[in-house]
Amino acid sequence: MAHLNDDDRGQIILIAALALAVTFIGLALVVNSAIYTQNLASRGEVAGSNDALEMRAMVETSVGHGITAANKYNYSTQTTLETGVRESIGTVSTQTERQRVTSGTLVNVTLAGSPTYGTRIAQTNTSLFESGEATPSADWMVRERATRPGDGTNATRRFVINATQLPSSGSEFVVIANGTGGNPKWTMRVWGDVGPSGTVNVEVDTPSGTQTCAVPIEEPYAHIDVTGGTVQGEPCLALQGGSFDGRFAHGVGDEYNISYESGDQIKGNYSMVVRDSKRAYTLDTAPASPFSTTAIYDVTVRYRYDTSNLRYEAKIRVAPGEPDAS
């Protein structure tokens, strides 16, 4: 019968201890990897986590550009819209992976389910903001019953005005989001001058108060991002949140009508996307102006970021131009 001396026993115990240590380290890495997958946003110290989150932001921006392009150029049917967005997402996935593959990182982006459809309302030629009827009206309803969905997201986004001519004080162009069922209304008035030494004035009334912003302008047109809350690319407090919340249609309830008043006092173009697909009080199809067409309101994409020690997966809702999209 073979016998082990004390030295042999010591070596066996040492080898066994090392094997157990390696096993525990491996298990710890597996467990930590799973934790990081679920809680990456709160674990900035994890190697590669900042890169994963930065790439997520880039993906969201790029997919948003794809939605905007599809709504502008592929609006004929829902099928062509979805095809355009899928191709755009495929391009985003390929390009992001090419940027990272040399560092041993794999990135994948795919469309999760079908897009949410709505309506794009636009005027693309440079003309007065009147209705598209045979006898145009300066005071008219652009949208009837824009309805917020049950998840609390906005009913209207990417509402942008580019004006080559502004009305003077006393004859302001007015946009109204009028709540239905006796709810209060949100009102925006615009006036000023374009060109050298000009000024764009935006005044907003909401149930919580009234505020005005005035922005100098040197360009031959005024750019007002109504839902984005900027004028000439600069923050306009009258259109933003905070103690005075002037966000478009804020405080008027879940259903409202969108109307223009004094549309014959302003000239240029505009565009907006609404969440539901009810008919607008405009011509039904492009290229007549103003017009309404089917549009993609938002999409959800699956985003996956893999390295040798990190896996991050998330679903990202993309609604370009919606202030509270996430």
Image (tube, rainbow, N blue to C red):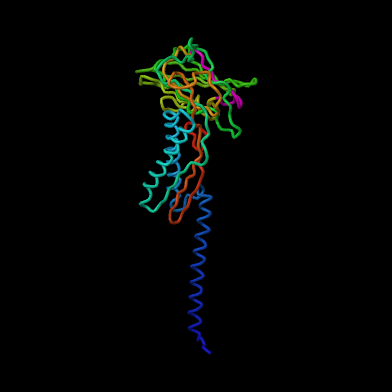
- Residue 187 visible to the viewer: no
**Which residue lies most toward the bottom here?**
1
Q: Is residue 247 left or right of residue 267?
A: right
How far from the left and from the top, in percent, is residue 227?
49, 27
Query: Residue at position x 51%, y 82% from top?
Result: 9
Question: In the figure, 118 relative to 40: above or below?
Answer: above
Name the quadrant containing residue 145: top right
Question: Measuring 49% from the left and 60% from the top, which residue is drawn there?
Answer: 29
Give the x, y percent position of residue 222.
40, 21
Residue 144 occupies which quadrant of the picture?
top right
Q: Residue at x 56, y 32 (%)?
A: 153
Query: Can you give x and y, in whole percent of width and height, for residue 210 in the image?
Result: 54, 21
- Segment tinted magenta in the rendering: 249-262
Magenta-span inclusion, residue 261: yes
Q: Is residue 49 visible?
A: yes
Q: Name the foreground residue: 152 vs 144.
A: 144
Residue sitting nearer the eye, 171 or 107: 107
Number of on-image labels: 0
Give the image location of residue 143, x and y in percent. 54, 21
Is residue 173 toward the left or the right of residue 181 in the image? left
Figure check: 114 above or below 244: below
User: In the image as oriented, which residue stretches furthest toward the right?
Assistant: 181
Q: Work out whether residue 244 or residue 185 is closer to the camera in this orientation and state it.
A: 185
Task: Indicate yes or no whether the magenta region holds residue 219.
Answer: no
